């Protein structure tokens, strides 16, 4: 859960956005978007209140963001693209992102699907509180006969099953 708050000024401040992802792109509605910041369609939560936020991340397949039970943002195929992959992006501070050592690494990997990485919880320009953070690994034992069977498993790892 995150403590989110609007400014009570009538201006939209959505929760569950994909803020400022330099050097990455995603597919939305069948088209690749290179937008640096992608706003969700969540409502604005004025004042201090707790909201429940969920991020469903299926590697390079898709990501879904849910705020208080409403799906507020979905996209597919996160990939290297935009920003640092642009040959005209000279002078950008490429050393600070992605672990790639040189701008040419970004350019040659343009379009490469991102299968792994980090999930960051953040607030831009204002304080935020988090509580009850849980991570659910969707890879594991998918055999209903096993003692450690998990019904939510998406990618079965039979070697992890205990009988």
Image (cartoon, grey):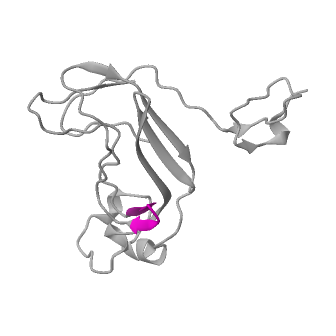
Question: In which quadrant of the rendered view does residue 162 lie?
Answer: top right
On screen, residue 30 versus residue 45, left or right, reads right
The residue at the far left in this view is 9
Q: Position of residue 5 (x, y in %)?
A: 22, 27
For the residue pair 18 and 115, the one nearer the viewer reads as 18
Q: How many marks?
A: 0
User: In the picture, which quadrant includes the C terminus?
Assistant: top right
Q: Residue at x 52, y 26 (%)?
A: 134
**Is there any visible trace of residue 57 in the rendered image?**
yes
Question: In which quadrant of the rendered view does residue 80 lie?
Answer: bottom left
For the residue pair 44 and 93, the one nearer the viewer reads as 44
Q: Position of residue 42 (x, y in %)?
A: 31, 38
- Above-or-below relation of 85 to 21: below
**Is there any visible trace of residue 117 in the rendered image?**
no
Q: Position of residue 51 (x, y in %)?
A: 35, 24
Please tell me whether the stretch drawn in magenta is mainly helix, strand or loop.
strand
User: In the picture, which quadrant includes the N terminus?
Assistant: top left
Q: Residue at x 47, y 25 (%)?
A: 133
On screen, residue 59 versus residue 129, left or right, reads right
Q: Position of residue 154 (x, y in %)?
A: 69, 42
Residue 64 falls inside the magenta stretch: no
Question: In which quadrant of the rendered view does residue 47 lie?
Answer: top left
Q: Residue at x 18, y 39 (%)?
A: 12
For the residue pair 108 and 15, the one nearer the viewer reads as 15
- Above-or-below relation of 142 to 109: above
The residue at the far bottom in this view is 87
Q: Identify the magenta region.
A: 24-32
């Amino acid at each position: 859960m995150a403590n989110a708050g609007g400014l009570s000024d009538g201006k939209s401040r959505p929760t569950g956005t994909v803020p400022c992802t330099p050097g990455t792109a995603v597919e939305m509605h069948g088209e690749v978007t290179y937008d640096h910041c992608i706003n969700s369609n969540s409502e604005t939560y004025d004042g201090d209140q707790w909201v429940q936020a969920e991020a469903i991340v299926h590697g390079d397949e898709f990501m879904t963001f849910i705020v208080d039970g409403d799906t507020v943002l979905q996209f597919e195929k996160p990939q290297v693209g935009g920003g640092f992959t642009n040959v005209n992006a000279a002078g950008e501070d490429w050393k600070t992102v992605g672990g790639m050592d040189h701008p040419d690494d970004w350019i040659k990997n343009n379009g490469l699907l991102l299968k792994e990485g980090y999930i960051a919880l953040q607030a831009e320009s204002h304080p935020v509180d988090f509580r009850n953070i849980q991570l659910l690994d969707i890879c594991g034992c998918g055999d209903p006969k096993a003692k450690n069977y998990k019904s939510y498993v998406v990618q079965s790892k039979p070697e992890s099953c205990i009988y």
